Amino acid sequence: MTTETLKVGDVLLTRVSYAEIEVEPEQVGLTADEVTAAGAPSEWVTNDKPRASASAWIVDHAGARIVVDPAGAVDDILRNDNDAAMHQEAFAALLEEAGYPRERITHAVATHLDGIGMLAWRNDDGSWAPFFPNAPILMSQRELDAIDSLPFELQGRKVLAELETQGAVQGTGEHEDLTEAVAFDFTGGHNPGHMVVRIESNGEQAIMLGHLALTPLHVALQKDSNHMDAAVANERLRELLEEDAILVGPLWPSPAAGRWNGTEVVPLTL
């Protein structure tokens, strides 16, 4: 459990990590041979296995405190019936220790739906409320519309529906300015309404990739099959790489940010 910070111009990014683990290559759509071929730095791979994290990034700028994809994609571990209360209380305590108590978060951004993560707080009676009580949950309207039309149910859909009935969820357009330096932009690909978070300040730029790359190895290999539309997702990722921005991944292990050098994502020193 660690806290790390990154400055992008006048914007402060804080990463609060709850857990970091090694995962089997197949869990991120790779083979063992592909992991070896990537030749990734030890920050991204240990024991020939990709590393992943359950964490939250907070973007702090101009009075806005924006949490992005908090502990997404790990509902099976953190949000199950037996352990949900314990994990959410521990996660909330870490955020408060980092200086971002959940009541002070102003926006809760979901780049897409992949489990409810720490966007919702499970009450003792089994009902759900917003994890960040004063922050609207922002998700693209494209994603919200697509969720209802998919022939299968995405993980977290039932909880999201409960939050929608409470008025806690707001659909966004394909581009939304959250502050003058922070924007929410549509990419599609991974999910029909997938978005990324862009940060541009004082000539510096960072892109929070959502799940366009579940691991930095996907960037190095230029391949990820864990998408609803892999061709679109991989092409959009390649376009973003041309911008020479700092890359941030919500599931990436520490430092969870790096720069593309044309061959691999080189970890930043935070």
Image (spheres, rainbow, N blue to C red):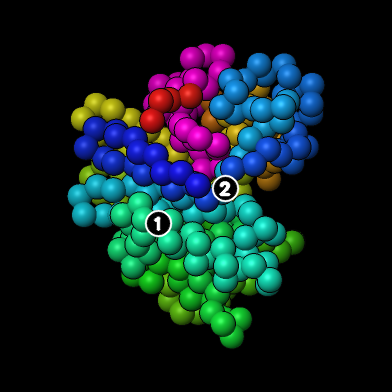
Is residue 54 left or right of 169 when viewed as pictured? Answer: right
Residue type marked 2: Ala
Q: Which residues are magenta?
A: 239-266
Q: Residue at x 41, y 25 (%)?
A: 269
Query: In this rendering, would 255 be left or right of 150?
Result: left
Is residue 16 visible in the rendered image? The answer is: yes
Look at mark 1 in the image and give the residue it sits on. Answer: 95
Marking on residue 19: 2
> In the image, residue 130 lies at what x, y percent?
45, 71
Task: Tell me which residue sits at (57%, 71%) in the image.
Answer: 85
Q: Considering depth in this image, is 183 or 109 the residue closer to the camera?
A: 109
Asked where in the image residue 147 lies, by quadrant, the reply is bottom right
Q: Is residue 188 above or below residue 39?
A: below
Please report the residue visible at 52 percent of the width from the left and 22 percent of the height from the top.
Answer: 265
Provide the secondary structure element on which disc 1 rests. helix
For mark 2, does the 10 Å Cα neighbourhood hold few (<14), some (14 to 19), or many (20 or more) residues?
some
